[in-house]
Image: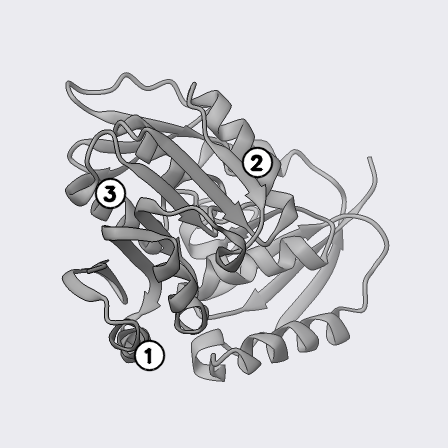
Amino acid sequence: MNNYYELKIKINPEMSDIISDILFDVFDCEGIVMVEETYKDLEMIDSTEGTLKAFIRGEKPDFDAILAEQKEILKSRGLTDEELGSWEYSLEEKENQDWSKKWKEKWDVTHVTEHIAVVPTWIEYSPKQEEIIVRLDPGCAFGTGTHQTTQLCMKALEKYFIKGQSMADIGMGTGILSILAKKLGASEVYGCDNDETVIDVAKENAELNGEKCFFELGTADKITKKYDFVCANILHNVLFDIMADLKNIMKDDAIMSLSGILQEKAQIVLEAIKRENLKIIDEIQQDQWTSFVVKKG
C-alpha cells in the first residue's frame, strides 16, 4: 500500500466541520478527524487541543500555498483569525494503515433529543419506543449529526415541522436534515448544495434510510418552488447574503430554521432577518452556537 501524508493543523474546534469540508475539497483526503474529539484515547495519536488531522493520499501538494489561499477566502467572507485559529501545521509522511477502521470504532450513537438518534451505518442499534433514528454514512460531507449546528436544526424540525408539509434543505451536506424531515412525515423533500462531492453521499444516505428525497447541485437563488419548511445550516455571512433568496422559497406562513451561527455573529443574521421582515418565533442555543426559527408573513 502507498504511503500517505498526515497533516496536523491548529484550528478553532468550533470551525472543524467547515474546515474539514474545505480540506476534503482541495486535497485527496482519506479522512479527517478532530484529535480531541475522535482519537483522544488511541495511543497512536496524541491529544492536542484544536488540532485537526487530515490523511492525504498521492503526491505531496503545496500545503503552504493552498492553506494560505483557503484561509484568505474564509477571511474574505467575514471570518477572523481568532474564529479560524492559527492554521499552523505540521506534516509527516507515514506508512499506510487501516486507520479508517479505528475511526469507525470511535463513532457512537448520537442522541440529539429524547426522540431522535443518529446512528452510523456500521453500528447495530435498536431504537427505543417512539424514537426516530437516522442511519448515516458521513462520507466526506458536512452534517454528521454530532455537530451542534446540525443538532440545532434537528431540534427545530422536531418542534415545528408538521406531518404532510414540504421541506427544502439548503446546503444539505449528508442529507441528514432532509432524511429526518421525511421520517417526520414530509410530503416532499428537496435538498441542494454547492459542493458536487456531497450529492451522491446524500443520495446514498437517503437510500440507506429507505426515504425518497430529491438532491441536486444548486443554490437557493435558482429555486422557483416554494416550501412549507426551510432549513439552512450555513455560515452566518452566507445567511446574510442569501436571506432574500431563502425568504423567496418560503410559502406564506412558512417556517425556517437558520443555523451555523456562532453566538458572537448572531447580530449579523438578525440584521438580515429584520431586513427581510421575517418574524423570529424561537432561538435555540447549544454551546457556542445559536439558531433562529423564523416565520414568513
Q: Quadrant of residue 60?
A: bottom right
* Percent x, y of residue 120: 43, 30
Name the residue nearer the viewer: 235 or 10. 235
Q: Amino acid at mark 3?
A: Leu
Residue plotted at (24% across, 71% down): 277
Where, quadrant-wise, is the C terminus in this rendering?
bottom left
Q: Is residue 153 visible?
A: yes
Q: Which mark is residue 201?
A: 2
> Residue at coordinates 52% horizontally, 78% vertically from top-left?
77
With 175 as the anchor, is 67 left or right in this view? right
Return the mark for residue 268. Answer: 1
Label pair 2/1, CB-CB below 8 angstroms: no
Tell me the crowding category of disc 2: few under 14, some 14 to 19, or many 20 or more residues within 10 angstroms, Cα based: many
Q: For numbered disc 3, what is the local secondary structure?
A: helix
* Rendering coords of residue 238 (x, y %): 46, 69
Residue position for label 3: 157
Q: Earlier in the sequence, mark 3 or mark 2?
A: 3
Is residue 109 visible in the rendered image? The answer is no
Q: Helix or strand or loop: what does disc 2 sit on? A: helix
Q: Residues within 10 Å of mark 1 (few under 14, many from 20)?
A: some
Q: Residue at x 15, y 35 (%)?
A: 114
Q: What's the residue at 21%, 30% (across, down)?
A: 163
Task: Give the residue type at disc 1.
Answer: Ile
Characterize the local packing of mark 3: few (<14), some (14-19) or many (20 or more) Cα atoms within 10 angstroms. many
Q: Nearer the viewer, mark 2 or mark 1?
A: 1
Q: From mark 2 to mark 1, how far is it between C-alphas?
A: 31 Å
Q: Earlier in the sequence, mark 2 or mark 1?
A: 2
Query: Of helix, strand and loop, which one carries label 1?
Result: helix
